[in-house]
Image (cartoon, coloured by chain):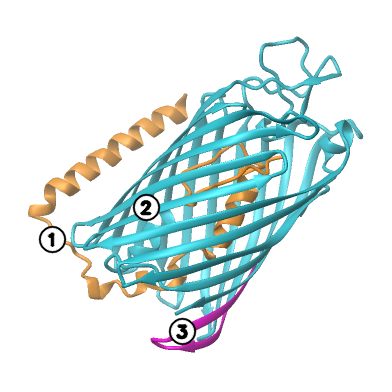
Chain colours: A orange, B cyan
Amino acid sequence: MNACRILQSASAIGALMLASMLSGCASVEPWVKPYERERLADPIMKTSGGALADKHREHVREVREASRGANGVQGGGCGCK
Amino acid sequence: MGGLLAASSGRALTLPEDSVEALFHMYKGGGLTASGPAVLVRKSLADKVSLSGSYYVDSVSSASVDVITTASPYKEKRTEYGFGADYVYRDSQITLSGSNSKEPDYTANSMGLDIAQEVFGGMTTIGLGYTRGADKVGQKGIGFFDNAKHWQYRFGITQILSPRWIASANFEAISDSGYLGSPYRVARVFGAAIPERVPRTRSSRALKFRTSHDLGSRNAVHAEYRYFWDTWAIKAHTAELGYSRYFGDLWLADAFLRFYSQKHALFYSDNAAAESLYISRNRQLSTFNSIGLGGKVSYTWKRVPGKYEIKANGAYELVQYKFKDYTDIRSGGTYSLNANVLQLSITATF
């Protein structure tokens, strides 16, 4: 159950960070301006290989592994023999 | 949603570009080959709505270890149609999507709704999503005899940390109800084959953290970790590390290493010593590890700034699966296999 405790702690820290971030909107200005985000929009920052390629990779894994979800690709169909 | 968040986080939310993507995909390993073409077309209307449609084929030819030892090799085809509509209003994006998948003995339909909202000067993107699925389960010679329903709830947050650093956290809860096993699969009790019996409900949770960092020399590193747990007592860890870099102006290459491990379901047994209410020998529910080593290459074939761009892409991954409590009945040893995953595609954006 150690993993569960770690997750609970992580969730609590995440919630605190989110709360402090949202409550701090009035005092903390966004520190990365829109014109500074060019590098973040570059294809090199994406692990995606395209919508269909992601869908395929996700399907290959989902039908062989018991785990699923939180990947950002919508599934569909079974094909799970 | 993660893809949407990652794609949209570099600047204010905008509609996806008009595009055409054509893919050939193949998985080959352990006596099973699954391959086929897939096409996706995306087009915006009046710069307000972007519509997409996709067609995806999986032709499966299976002589895998469980098929060979308990049934006969088979071939079948799965066809999936998908559609999507994206709408952007100020700092929000709403995505409606649906899919229909058909096999001779399995059909699956799903509808999903995702909402992404930029806050904090566009540095933070919050996403919420819901998908509802309904399947019909059948068996050759009998026809459709049961069904399954699925509910997926997603929550994600993507945060720009610096002009070169971005991170995201995604959570997804999935619940299933109905026939969740396979009518073809058998379990073993005292060495004798009996039909598997799987619970009719399942609920799972997954939490994933992902980060990408631009190293400054036209290269970047990526890392992600996912923890998964469910009501069948399965627990799984997934970790992936990646590195990307440009070679000249036209070539972009990525390499990645993925580690996966899971602990078996409560009712999984390689060869049970007692009958129980639920029993399965589905190796997808067993204890195993896998390591995947892969690479992707993207070549910009033609580019006319402001007009169009055409790219050719190739990806390959070698995956090694090592099962801890699944015996290869033919040899008596624990089962392992190597698989090859190949993707070749052309993408054009306008």
**Label 2: few (<14), some or many (≥20) within 10 Å?**
many
Answer yes or no: do the residues labelled 3 and 1 have beta carbons within 8 Å? no
* Vertical comparison of A29 with B247: above or below: above
Q: Vertical placement of A19 versus B266: above or below?
A: below
The CA span between labels 3 and 1 is 37 Å
Q: Which mark is residue A29?
A: 1
Looking at the rendered structure, which numbered label has been put on residue B168? 2
Name above or below for residue A73 compared with residue A42. Answer: above
Residue shown at the point (23%, 44%) measured from the top left: A18
Q: Chain of mark 1?
A: A
Q: Where, by quadrant of the figure, is residue B317 drawn?
A: bottom right
Mark 3 residue crowding within 10 angstroms, few (<14) / some (14–19) / many (20+): few
Which residue carries the number 3 mark?
B308
The percent position of residue B56, horizontal first and vertical second, equals 62, 58
Residue drawn at (21%, 63%) of the image: B90
The residue sitting at 41% across, 56% down in the picture is: B211
Farthest right residue in view:
B330
Mark 2 and mark 3, same subunit? yes
